[in-house]
């Protein structure tokens, strides 16, 4: 018969009474002492670093508070992290050459360079301003502002970045009895290290009778050297007219999608490039029988700031009914712009043009209808004040037809085929001058039953007379 199994205690008496002491040798004691010393040194350095960082942060706060209170107004300044300053209820007034600028914001986050901070310098790296309001007020008479010499502040100018979202810009006094309001405005302005150029990217909406959204990207080094791009997805003439003291003086209706590039270089005129689509454009005093223009316009303009004169180096218009180009100058030195522009059209609605060059002598007897085959050429010069310009035009063509419908039965009807046409006209006298060669045609008098065929010859226009 098997015996029941019993658990055996494997421990021995000698093992149970084994002492729990370690006989530390000389090297072990040195290692333990070194570990203890390192721990104490680490804790001490950590406390010292924390103490120094707190001193740095407090010094940063005091320096920033002193500098900001010297130039700006704020409710309080608090430290954010190791290198951040939160300026609450920020407000500053800055005199400018055109008047006064006031900037306010509920708060501004300022980040400084930590390495420079360790050496006692405050170098601003980035400023975040959201919901800020800037108001520029133009003075009645602009005078240059001479800034007084300022003592050293300890603030080091360097590369920086300023970012703002949901801001508002107001311009007062720049237009008669109008304040321009831009909202919302999102922008980013920065300068790279060792670079004199300031960069700006801005997206805003000009509030008014019709809002004008636009974007601007640019680079500015000085008043003599800068460049920028501006574009708008839709700019209506109604919105522009709402900004003018005398609306609809130049343009009645229409819409644009302009894209503008401007460059300025020292010793050279400002150069501007414009591209835009045009929709349903109607100029002031445009005749009712002239259709609204839709198409594309491209222009290159040079502006001399000394003479206040713009030179239109190249202007091209391309639409369904109009195609042409123009060059010339526009002088902005007086109260009203003075024009001196030469234009040339290879496609234009002829009926409204020809209807306005008929002499009173022709209108007395009936209606003259002229149709010209392409290609034809219409050149014109527009000169004088922009409000009341004088237009001189010249029409040349190689082939066309002329039909005359008398106002009374006693006058004959006529239908002519013409060859060379060279006729000029001006808006001052409203009289045509030139020649029209007839290569074939017929004239019929209904009352007498007389009819002439195979008519040919040359018509000379000289004011009211036709020979």
Image: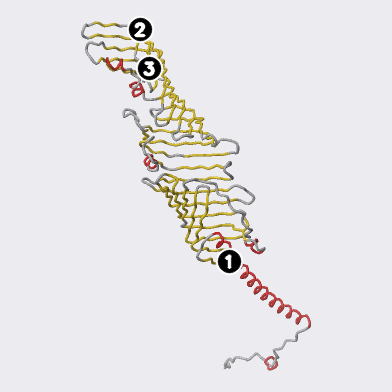
Secondary structure beneath disc 1?
helix
Do labels 2 and 1 touch, CB within 8 Å? no
Q: x and y percent of residue 459 in the render? A: 37, 10
Q: Residue at x 40, y 14 (%)?
A: 434
In primary-sequence order, the first of circles 3 and 1 is 1
Mark 2 to mark 3 CA distance (whole Å): 21 Å
- Tell me where residue 106 appears, x and y as whole percent: 47, 61
Quick one: SS at disc 2? loop
Q: State the mark number for residue 432.
A: 3
Name which of mark 2 and mark 1 comes first in the sequence. 1
Of marks 2 and 3, the one in the foreground: 3
Work out whether 36 lies above or below 374: below
Q: Pick the residue in front: 65 or 298.
A: 65
- At which x and y percent is residue 36? 70, 79
Identify the residue shown where x is 51% and y is 56%.
93
Distance of mark 2 from mark 1, alpha carbons?
A: 97 Å
In the picture, the disc for residue 456 is 2
Whichever of callouts 2 and 3 sits on the residue coming sooner in the sequence is 3
Vertical order, 331 against 63 (above or below): above
Q: Is residue 315 left or right of residue 352?
A: right
Q: Report the side of 402 relative to 225 (left or right).
A: left
Within 10 Å of disc 2 (Cα), the crowding (few <14, some 14-19, many 20+) is some
Element under disc 3:
strand
Task: Reply above or below: 59 against 460.
Answer: below
**Which is closer to the viewer, label 2 or label 1?**
1
Location of the N terminus by quadrant is bottom right
Q: Which residue is mark 1?
A: 61
Count of numbered marks: 3
Q: Residues within 10 Å of mark 1 (few under 14, many from 20)?
A: some
């Amino acid at each position: 018969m098997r015996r029941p199994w019993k658990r055996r205690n494997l421990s021995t008496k000698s093992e149970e009474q084994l002492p729990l002491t370690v006989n530390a040798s000389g090297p072990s004691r040195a290692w333990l002492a070194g570990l203890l010393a390192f721990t104490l040194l680490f804790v001490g350095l950590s406390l010292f670093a924390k103490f120094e960082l707190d001193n740095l942060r407090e010094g940063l706060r005091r320096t920033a508070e002193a500098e900001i209170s010297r130039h700006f107004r704020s409710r309080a300044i608090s430290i954010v992290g190791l290198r951040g300053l939160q300026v609450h209820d920020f407000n500053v007034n800055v005199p400018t050459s055109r008047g006064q600028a006031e900037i306010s914001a509920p708060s501004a986050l300022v980040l400084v360079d930590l390495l420079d901070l360790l050496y006692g310098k405050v170098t601003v790296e980035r400023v975040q301003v959201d919901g800020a309001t800037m108001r520029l007020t133009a003075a009645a008479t602009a005078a240059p502002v001479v800034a007084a010499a300022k003592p050293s502040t300890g603030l080091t100018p360097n590369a920086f970045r300023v970012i703002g979202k949901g801001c508002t810009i107001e311009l007062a006094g720049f237009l008669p009895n109008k304040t321009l309001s831009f909202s919302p405005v999102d922008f980013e302005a920065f300068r790279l290290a060792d670079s004199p150029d300031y960069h700006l990217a801005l997206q805003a909406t000009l509030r008014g009778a019709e809002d004008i959204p636009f974007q601007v990207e640019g680079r500015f080094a000085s008043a003599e050297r800068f460049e920028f791009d501006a574009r708008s997805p839709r700019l209506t003439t109604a919105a522009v007219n709402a900004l003018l003291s005398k609306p609809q003086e130049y343009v009645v209706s229409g819409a644009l999608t302009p894209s503008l590039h401007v460059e300025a270089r020292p010793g050279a005129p400002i150069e501007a490039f414009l591209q835009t689509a045009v929709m349903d454009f109607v100029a002031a005093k445009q005749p009712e029988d002239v259709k609204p223009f839709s198409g594309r316009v491209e222009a290159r303009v040079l502006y001399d700031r000394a003479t206040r004169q713009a030179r239109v180096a190249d202007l091209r218009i391309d639409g369904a009914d109009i195609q042409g180009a123009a060059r010339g100058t526009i002088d902005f030195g007086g109260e009203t712009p003075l024009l001196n522009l030469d234009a040339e059209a290879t496609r234009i609605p002829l009926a409204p043009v020809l209807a306005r060059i008929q002499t009173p002598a022709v209108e007395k007897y009936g209606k003259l209808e002229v149709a010209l085959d392409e290609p034809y050429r219409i050149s014109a010069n527009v000169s004088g004040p922009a409000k009341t310009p004088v237009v001189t035009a010249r029409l040349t063509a190689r082939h066309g037809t002329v039909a005359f419908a008398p106002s009374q039965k006693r006058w004959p009807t006529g239908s002519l085929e013409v060859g060379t046409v060279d006729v000029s006209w001006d808006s001052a006298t409203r009289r045509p001058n030139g020649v029209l060669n007839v290569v074939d045609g017929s004239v019929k008098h209904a009352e007498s039953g007389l009819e002439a065929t195979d008519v040919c010859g040359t018509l000379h226009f000289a004011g009211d007379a036709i020979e």
